[in-house]
Image (tube, helix red, strand yellow):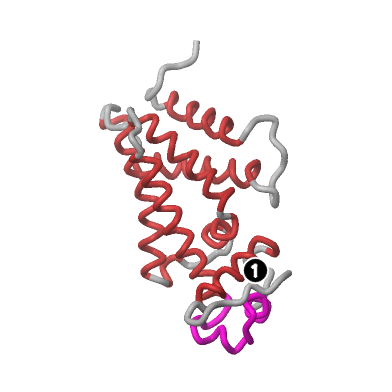
Amino acid sequence: MPKRGYHHGNLKQALVEATLTLIEGKGPTGFTVAEAAKLAGVTPAAVYRHFNGREALIAECALQGHRIFGDLMEHAYADGRPTALKAFEATGRAYLAFARKFPGHYMAMFESGVNLQSNPDLALASDRSRGVLEQAAMRLSENIPEHKRPPAKMFSSHIWALSHGVVELFARGTPGSKSPYPPEDLLEAGIGIYLRGLGLIEPDH
């Protein structure tokens, strides 16, 4: 695996990029600080100028990932969608796209066991991306009578869990398995079943 090296003043980001590479290849718990330092082209002691250990490296990867993810989710939701339903479906596709394009960030965010509350910036970034989906759920369900309407946080959590399951099982190589259908189609069908159950879209005939 080649050394990435770094430019003066950019050691912190070089270490983050090295960590992301290691996470992609070995998982979030399968590497050491020394390996991250070696890949970045520095000594292990240099890591501690910016991070107090592996968990801090992973937390920084997760923080940057949540910020990218939040941008993608906000763009997907607000990008001129004609209806609340189209905007909602777009956030699901953005979830799949993010997992594919940023696998190291994704694993740091959702598979590392990083404590979101250990870092105020990380907690804020995580709340932002989840808030987009919650807002989409609230808007989509506002026409359901209040006594039948699920809480927006519950609604959005169900869709989040469905999206995460499709990613883990069918949209990534490790772990994962081949699906007879594209992940986007699986997610769209699953969301459709859920929304029909709430009476938000017409049943198929």
Q: Is residue 174 magenta?
A: no
Residue under the image location 65 percent in, 30 percent down: 181
As drawn, is 131 to the left or to the right of 11? Answer: left
Give the x, y percent position of residue 136.
Answer: 35, 39
Residue under the image location 65 percent in, 68 percent down: 29
With respect to residue 70, does 166 lie above or below?
above
Tag 1, which secondary structure? Answer: loop
Quadrant position of the N terminus in the picture:
bottom right
Location of residue 182 by image quarter: top right
Q: How many labels sit on residues?
A: 1
Residue under the image location 32 percent in, 43 percent down: 135
As drawn, is 20 to the left or to the right of 154? Answer: right
As drawn, is 167 to the left or to the right of 76? Answer: right
Where does label 1 land, which residue?
29
Residues in magenta? 34-54
With respect to residue 23, does 159 lie above or below?
above
